Amino acid sequence: MSLYALSKLLYELNRDDDLKHQFSEDRNALLEGRDLTEEEQQAFLEEDIGLLYVLGVNGQILMHYAALCGIEWADYLQLMRDGVKKHGQVRAGVYAMLSSPDEKITV
C-alpha cells in the first residue's frame, strides 16, 4: 500500500539522522526503491504539506516532516486547510473525510 510506504518514509525520516542528512543532500536518492506514486513523490519533494495531508498522511507524522522543512506550526495548520481546498477531501487514512465537501473545514 502506497500510503503506508509514504507514511513509513516520513516516520523514518523523523527518527534517523542518516536519512535526515540524505534528505538535505539528495532527496531524489532518498526516494529510490520506495513504493510511492508519482503524486506522492512530487508532494514529498516539493514539501507540499497540503497534498501529503490530503493523500492521507497522519498529522502526527506529518508535523515532524513540516518541522524538518522549517515550516512553523501555524503555517503547517494553514497548509493542511489549503490542501483540502486545493486538492479536495482527504482520500485515505485516519483523516479521510466522510462529510460533505460543502461543510465547513475544521483542521
Image (spheres, rainbow, N blue to C red):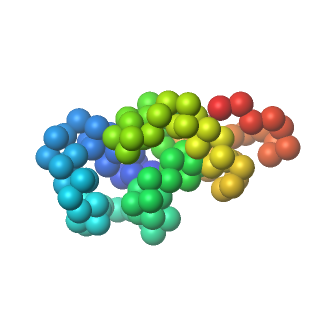
Residue closest to the eye, 90 or 68: 68
Q: Is residue 96 left or right of residue 17?
A: right
Q: Quadrant of residue 26?
A: bottom left
8 versus 64 height, above or below = below
Residue closest to the eye, 65 or 94: 65
How many circles with numbers are drawn on the protein? Answer: 0
* Location of residue 23 in the rendering, given as x and y in whole percent from the top left corner: 25, 53
Residue in the image at 61% along x and 38% along y: 78
* Location of residue 29 in the rendering, given as x and y in whole percent from the top left corner: 23, 65
* Location of residue 92 in the rendering, given as x and y in whole percent from the top left corner: 57, 47
Residue at the limit of the structure toward the right, as seen here:
102
Residue in the image at 14% along x and 46% along y: 18
- Which image quarter is the C terminus in? top right
Residue in the image at 31% along x and 49% along y: 9
Q: Quadrant of residue 70?
A: top left
* Location of residue 40 in the rendering, given as x and y in whole percent from the top left corner: 46, 60
Would you say residue 65 is visible in this rendering?
no
Would you say residue 75 is visible in this rendering?
yes
Q: Is residue 17 left or right of residue 71?
A: left
- Which image quarter is the N terminus in? bottom left
Residue in the image at 20% along x and 58% along y: 25
Q: Is residue 8 left or right of residue 80?
A: left
